[in-house]
Amino acid sequence: MTAVEERETVESPYGDQPVFTFQPQDGAEPIVVPKCSVLWEEVDGKKALEFLWEIRKLNEAYQSFEFMDRAKVPNDIQRRIVRLPDDERRKFFNNWFSDLSAPPTVGLPPE
């Protein structure tokens, strides 16, 4: 079994929302969070571009915490992610964020 596995649906506190599942190497219970693509949706009346503007000056590590809050990842699950060994935590975030193939472009100037 691979360390990282994505599934469209698993039993989770997120209802029918697509989830991302990460299996820690120590064999602990899998970490289940909403797929990162939820971050481009409007959340609590705030569009993605406004959210990105708000966190633009934060260190990347702190931005990750803001992204988890925006995705409504419960604090107990966030704590499990933070407690992962450095290499696993890096793998978790790299794979979770890989779902974000392109940021929202609405309102951004053309290249």
Image (cartoon, rainbow, N blue to C red):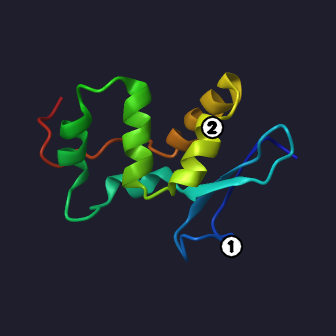
Three-letter code for the amino acid on which mark 2 is drawn:
Phe
**Residue where numbered disc 1 is placed:** 11
Query: Residue at the location (11% across, 35% down)?
Result: 109
Query: Residue at the location (44% across, 44% down)?
Result: 100
Three-letter code for the amino acid on which mark 1 is drawn:
Glu
Q: Quadrant of the C terminus?
A: top left
Q: Where, by quadrant of the figure, is residue 85 drawn? A: top right
Q: Earlier in the sequence, mark 2 or mark 1?
A: 1
Residue 56 — which label? none
Total numbered labels: 2
Give residue 95's position: percent from left, percent from top: 60, 39
Q: Is residue 40 left or right of residue 4?
A: left
Q: Where, by quadrant of the figure, is residue 72 drawn? A: bottom left
Q: Is residue 77 left or right of residue 111?
A: right
Query: Residue at the location (20% across, 64% down)?
Result: 45
Give residue 103's position: percent from left, percent from top: 32, 42
Q: Residues within 10 Å of mark 2 (few under 14, many from 20)?
A: many
Depth order, front residue of 28/93: 28
Q: CA distance from mark 2 to mark 1?
A: 20 Å
Query: Residue at the location (32% across, 60% down)?
Result: 41
Give residue 60's position: percent from left, percent from top: 39, 26
Helix, strand or loop for disc 2? helix
**Residue where numbered disc 2 is placed:** 92
Helix, strand or loop for disc 1? loop
Depth order, front residue of 30/77: 77
Depth order, front residue of 74/103: 74
